[in-house]
Amino acid sequence: MARGGFQGFGKVPNMGNIMKQAQKMQREMAKLQEELENMTFEASAGGGAVTVVATGKKEIQEIKINPEVVDPEDVEMLQDLILAAVNEALRKAEETVNNEMSKLTGGLGGIPGLF
């Protein structure tokens, strides 16, 4: 080892700057999270027979059912349409949240325990 310590890494990053950047990212993430939670995502099934609106919190906000598809003899079909629309709305919400957070973190979210 050379006198004066190890010289292999060059300049050590300023911890103050790293902390400021981390705090800024944390504020931006909180703001983005709030914005995403207030967004709504709509999906339909059966050619619009059933429409579901979900929030970014992945909560179902509204279900619309076209009265023409309500058949007491085929409740199972209606249940399947509702399930399909709910799952699609939640998938859209999840995908948007993940994409927006990934943009903000620059892919750092993949490091376990970081965010």
Image: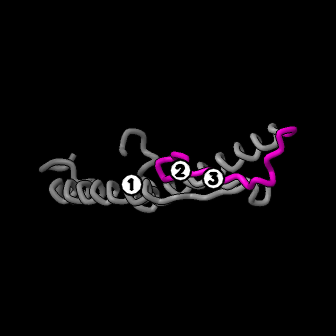
**Residue kind at label 3, given as amino acid type:** Val
Which numbered disc flags the more N-terminal residue, 3 or 2? 3
- Return the residue at label 2: 61
Q: Give the range drawn in magenta.
A: 55-74
User: Considering only vertical position in the picture, is 112 above or below 101?
Assistant: above
The reply to whether the magenta stretch includes residue 67 is yes
Contact between marks 3 and 2 (CB within 8 A): the answer is no
Q: Which residue is drawn at 16% across and 48% down?
A: 5
Q: Which residue is drawn at 67% across and 55% down?
A: 51
Q: Which residue is drawn at 81% across and 37% down?
A: 76
Contact between marks 1 and 2 (CB within 8 A): the answer is no
**Residue kind at label 1, given as amino acid type:** Gln
Are there few (<14), some (14-19), or many (20+) residues within 10 Å of tag 2?
few
Q: Residue at x 52, y 58 (%)?
A: 40
The secondary element bearing badge 1 is classed as helix
- Return the residue at label 3: 52
Checking the image for residue 33, the label placed there is: 1
